[in-house]
Amino acid sequence: MAPSSSSSVTPKTTTSKPNVFKRFDVVSDHSDHHYVNNKKGCGGGGGVQKKIMQEWKILEKHIPNSIYVHAYETRIDLLRAVVVGASGTPYHYALFFFDIAFYHSLLNTWPGKGKERWDPSQSMILQVLVLIQGLVLNKEPYFNEAGAGNRFGCEASRAYNEKVFILTCKTTLNFKAFTASFIYGEWS
């Protein structure tokens, strides 16, 4: 018999460790960040720092359940994001890591028009992360390729998805094996 809607069901945990993965967290160790040796930094004084702190607050409050971000207390110009591949895509539950460095001119590397361009007064890192998850790591990534056309569901797209799924699985398994070896002291 199913529990009634008024009953409370508490899941049992198998370990005594609390959930250590916060969706947004400020940590101290940035030593393995890809841009740790970046000498440019964010510069710009208080205005840039204030903008970065606003980004942190937006991330902390609005980040979706499937994205995790680490900010660094001693290097506010650096972020590390983990985007979880969405269900129903060839990236299903895989983890994608992005090391991000803030600069004066954060984006604007693509000649978009109007709202397609980065606008420091309105654009946010949160948008970039959500767009990566929704538009890049999508159900039919074949159509992200230049010249792929727009016949969604075509055989070329299905074949591409198979390759992407297999590569995602291999990468996930290799990452898991590397992490387990490193954590358990087997890494040499």
Image (tube, helix red, strand yellow):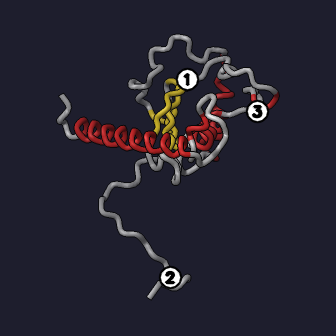
Foreground mark, 2 or 3? 3
Q: Residues within 10 Å of mark 2 (few under 14, many from 20)?
A: few
Task: Report the residue at 19% width, 36% height from top.
Answer: 185
Q: Is residue 173 visible?
A: yes
Residue 155: which quarter of the image?
top right
Whether residue 79 is situated above or below residue 35 in the rendered picture: below
- Write down the residue under mark 3: 122
Foreground mark, 1 or 2? 1
Q: Looking at the picture, how far across and down is residue 166, in whole percent?
A: 39, 43
Q: CA distance from mark 1 to mark 2?
A: 48 Å
In the displayed orientation, state which residue is furthest to the bottom: 1
Helix, strand or loop at mark 3: loop
Amino acid type, mark 3: Gln
Task: Report the residue at 57% width, 44% height from top.
Answer: 140
- Write down the residue under mark 2: 7
Helix, strand or loop at mark 1: strand
Question: For residue 90, which numbered disc appears in the image?
Answer: none
Q: CA distance from mark 1 to mark 3?
A: 18 Å
Question: For residue 101, which numbered disc appears in the image?
Answer: 1
Amino acid type, mark 1: Ala
- Asked if disc 2 and disc 3 are in contact, CB closer than 8 Å, the reply is no
